[in-house]
Image: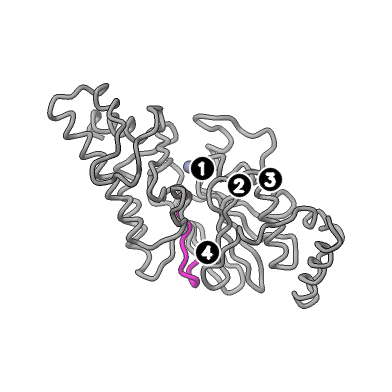
């Protein structure tokens, strides 16, 4: 680290009112955080974009909460940046929105940092035994799980993690910072881009539409939602209109497949229709067919009448 960098860090620590980092926390300063990756939203809640699913955070005078962890390297950067903001290398609670690696592989960086890791019971089970993919060799698994909801407090902020049914996986949670009125959607929100639909882990397109509606009903018109992913150049936050727009895309996809099958196309012919979904051209053409491809899953769901 350059002397200039050290001076800057010392000055930042001093600016935190003497809340100096303990010598044992020096490791935190070995990683140069990228301030541009942190965006404040409202009332101490913000988001961090590095590599993988968007991380949400709360830093207030009483503690720190983090939603999702990306990959170990970017998680380290995030932890270092949060330590600069809070003055300590400690996190009261790490919440996972679901089990996928681009949201949980970085959990390991929170070992010895996070006092607790919270996830839906199904998500925790899938982190240990993923239906597809591998368990990271080194992982920090959730120590607190829930089926319907979990509530906790960090200072004067109340945090709720709620599961409203199968959608992107079988264990998705929406994490709401109630007083800030900010909700982290995890991968329940892919903004203007085709989603991953993990049917092997319990995903359902119709269930996903219901969960988006339930989410909007459980919040209000001022709620800011953090999206797990957005298309290049699109924002990773937005309002209820974005959630309902994505619900409409899912409905449009099912209706498109239903109509093509009803007019006598074979499933293989429908699967070959990779051009953009009519009415949702901004999402672009579909990627290649795979078990997690939305068009493939739509054909399966329609054929099953699920
Ligand atoms: Zn995911």
Mark carried by residue 142: 2
Q: Contact (CB < 8 A) between labels 1 and 2?
A: yes
How did the renderer colour the structure? one colour
Which badge, 4 or 2, comes first in the chain's sequence?
A: 2
Which secondary structure lies at badge 4?
strand
Q: Quadrant of the C terminus?
A: top left
Q: Residues within 10 Å of mark 1 (few under 14, many from 20)?
A: many
- The residue at 39%/45% (across/down) is 193
Q: CA distance from mark 1 to mark 2?
A: 9 Å
Residue beneath disc 3 = 73
- The residue at 75%/52% (across/down) is 112
Span shown in magenta: 177-186
Please state which of residues 229 and 198 is positioned toward the viewer in this rendering. Answer: 229
Please state which of residues 300 and 129 is positioned toward the viewer in this rendering. Answer: 300
- The residue at 57%/51% (across/down) is 68
87 lies left or right of 274: right
Q: Is residue 179 on the magenta stretch?
A: yes
Q: CA distance from mark 4 to mark 3?
A: 26 Å
Q: Residues within 10 Å of mark 4 (few under 14, many from 20)?
A: many
Q: Quadrant of the N terminus?
A: bottom right
Q: Position of residue 278 (x, y in %)?
A: 23, 42
164 lies left or right of 280: right
Residue beneath disc 1 = 123
Residue beneath disc 4 = 159
Which badge, 1 or 2, comes first in the chain's sequence?
A: 1
Q: Contact (CB < 8 A) between labels 3 and 2?
A: no
Q: Position of residue 24 (x, y in %)?
A: 85, 57
């Amino acid at each position: 680290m350059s002397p200039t960098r050290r001076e800057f860090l010392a000055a930042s620590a001093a600016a935190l009112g003497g809340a100096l980092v303990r010598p044992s926390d020096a490791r935190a300063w070995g990683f140069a955080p990228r301030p541009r990756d942190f965006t404040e939203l409202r009332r101490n809640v913000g988001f961090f974009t590095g590599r993988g699913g968007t991380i949400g955070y709360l830093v207030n005078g009483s503690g720190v909460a983090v939603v999702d962890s990306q990959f170990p390297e970017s998680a380290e950067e995030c932890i270092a940046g949060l330590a600069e903001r809070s003055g300590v290398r400690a996190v009261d609670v790490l919440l996972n929105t679901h089990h996928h690696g681009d949201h949980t592989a970085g959990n390991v960086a929170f070992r010895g940092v996070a006092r607790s890791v919270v996830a839906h019971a199904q998500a925790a089970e899938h982190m240990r035994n993923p239906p597809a993919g591998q368990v990271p060799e080194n992982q920090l698994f959730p120590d607190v799980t829930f089926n319907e909801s979990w509530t906790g407090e960090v200072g004067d902020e109340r945090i709720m993690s709620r599961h409203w049914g199968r959608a992107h996986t079988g264990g998705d949670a929406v994490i709401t910072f109630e007083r800030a009125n900010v909700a982290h959607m995890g991968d329940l929100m892919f903004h203007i881009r085709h989603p991953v639909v993990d049917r092997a882990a319990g995903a359902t397109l119709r269930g996903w539409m219901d969960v988006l509606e339930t989410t909007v009903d459980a919040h209000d018109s001022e709620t800011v939602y953090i999206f797990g992913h957005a298309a290049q150049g699109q924002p990773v936050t937005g309002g209820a209109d974005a959630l309902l727009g994505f619900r409409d895309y899912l409905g449009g996809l099912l209706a498109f497949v239903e109509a093509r099958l009803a007019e006598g196309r074979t499933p293989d012919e429908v699967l070959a229709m990779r051009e953009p979904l009519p009415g949702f051209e901004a999402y672009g053409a579909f990627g290649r067919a795979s078990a997690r491809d939305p068009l493939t899953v739509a054909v399966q769901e329609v054929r099953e009448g699920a």
